[in-house]
Amino acid sequence: LCEDFETEHLFLDVDRQAPGEDYRTVIGRALDGAEVVLVVIGLRWLTITDRDGHRRLDDVDDMVRLEVETALARHLRVIPVLVQGAAMPGEDDLPPSLRALCFLTAVPIRPDPDFRPDMQRLVAALLGALRPAIATTVISVIVDDNSISSPTEQCAQGSPAQAGGVCRADDAR
């Protein structure tokens, strides 16, 4: 995404959320200008738990759940992005407020040698979904496990993010 969208317009909440900011406000502000939301689903997306062993997607206050719920409720274009060989969750796997996600067409992103062609297909889909006549915004909800390094570093290295936040890109190149 960093190659096809201006890097300074990429937003990841883990990088750009100021200490003391309410993440619900940050999510709402990020989604206000969104046209497309990417929900990146890895192998552990459905099973990640909190410190008490409860599945995070079942927590109504979980940041990832709020991001996806809000995007679906606002009828934004949501594109599931499957990484690490993950499959789409089934309807029974998700809380009722997230079940619409199960019926959306996903884009798989595979490791090399398929990574670049898969990303090109995703970028083409994003560019086709954005309204070219106005400043555009893309939001990417990137969730899986905590193996992510700094998203800014990942953009600089050209590697895909694997977990941890919201990515917004404005003004396609």
Image: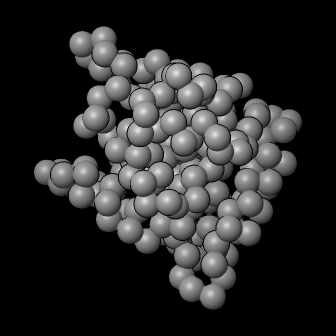
| Horizontal relation, residue 64 to residue 115: left or right | left
* Residue 110 coordinates in the image, percent (x, y): 76, 34
* Residue 61 coordinates in the image, percent (x, y): 25, 37
Can residue 63 be seen at all in this image of the molecule? yes
Q: Quadrant of residue 35?
A: bottom right
How many labels were placed on the picture? 0
Q: Residue furthest bottom?
A: 133
**Rendered position, 113 above or below 10:** above
| Horizontal relation, residue 138 to residue 129: left or right | left
**Rendered position, 55 above or below 144:** above
Which residue is located at x 25 percent, y 51 percent? 24
Q: Residue furthest left?
A: 20
Which residue is located at x 46 percent, y 38 percent? 98
* Residue 31 coordinates in the image, percent (x, y): 40, 62
Which residue is located at x 39 percent, y 52 percent? 70
Which residue is located at x 42 percent, y 54 percent? 73
